[in-house]
Amino acid sequence: EDQVTQSPEALRLQEGESSSLNCSYTVSGLRGLFWYRQDPGKGPEFLFTLYSAGEEKEKERLKATLTKKESFLHITAPKPEDSATYLCAVQAHFGNEKLTFGTGTRLTIIP
Amino acid sequence: DSGVTQTPKHLITATGQRVTLRCSPRSGDLSVYWYQQSLDQGLQFLIQYYNGEERAKGNILERFSAQQFPDLHSELNLSSLELGDSALYFCASSGGDREGYGYTFGSGTRLTVV
């Protein structure tokens, strides 16, 4: 069974203080690893898809990286508006197209 | 606006009742997925429909059912509701190669069972 574990559960940073969120996964043949951002009471918002180990993608202050066992979401010089829950999900090559999600990291950026 | 529309946004109902949640996918997307998100758990996959046919089932209770209509909108029916069914219910759609096989989520329906 596909599994995704995210750490830490919660993270508080000062504005401008860079850090990384971790997503460890086990999947029977990775088709894609996805990062989403979710604000309270809203639907997850797509950020990135990574397909193979060594791949990196960037968007503003966020950079996602992928290895064979984990992915990192690096946040550089965050701002208060980056406060949200960040979700990681995996999709397997075989079987249906469902995404298996981790429970997320709740990020708070303090001004 | 993500392009995935869910109605209603909020629903309050009593135990034992039945409700229907509705989802309109993004234009052109053939797949619809339903997820449940409760406070103590992450997003739990319930069911997937593709072009009107059920494609995959996850942790969906027998009291729950879904369907996808010819116009591709989908409905999730929840019956004999219990307090523990209170959660956010999300619909998502996907269009295969677009966005790297990822989903686009709607804004959800918050169900409160009292």
Image: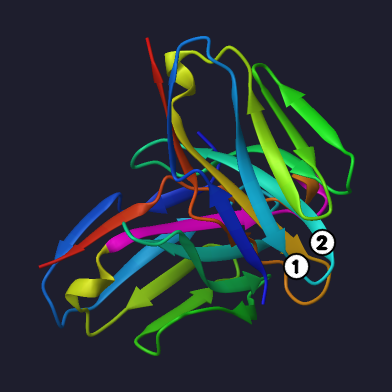
A13 sits left or right of B93 in the view: left
Picture layout, residue A7 above or below residue A37: below
Q: Secondary structure at mark 1?
A: loop
Q: Characterize the local packing of mark 2: few (<14), some (14-19) or many (20 or more) Cα atoms within 10 angstroms.
A: some
Instruction: Give the residue at x 73% y 74%.
Output: A96
| Point 30% across, 61% down: residue | B87
Q: Quadrant of residue B68?
A: bottom right
User: In the rendered view, would you say B67 is above or below B41?
Assistant: below
Magenta residues (range): B87-98
Q: Is residue A14 visible?
A: yes
Q: Is residue B112 above or below residue A23?
A: below
In the rendering, which numbered label is found on residue A30?
Answer: 2
Residue B100 in the image: above or below residue B61: above
Report x, y in % for residue A39.
Answer: 41, 35
Residue B24 visible somewhere in the drawing: no
Query: Amino acid type of disc 2?
Result: Leu
Q: Are marks 2 and 1 in contact (CB under 8 Å)?
A: yes
SS at circle 2: strand
Q: Nearer the viewer, residue B52 or B58?
A: B58
Chain letter for the residue marked with disc 1 in the picture:
A
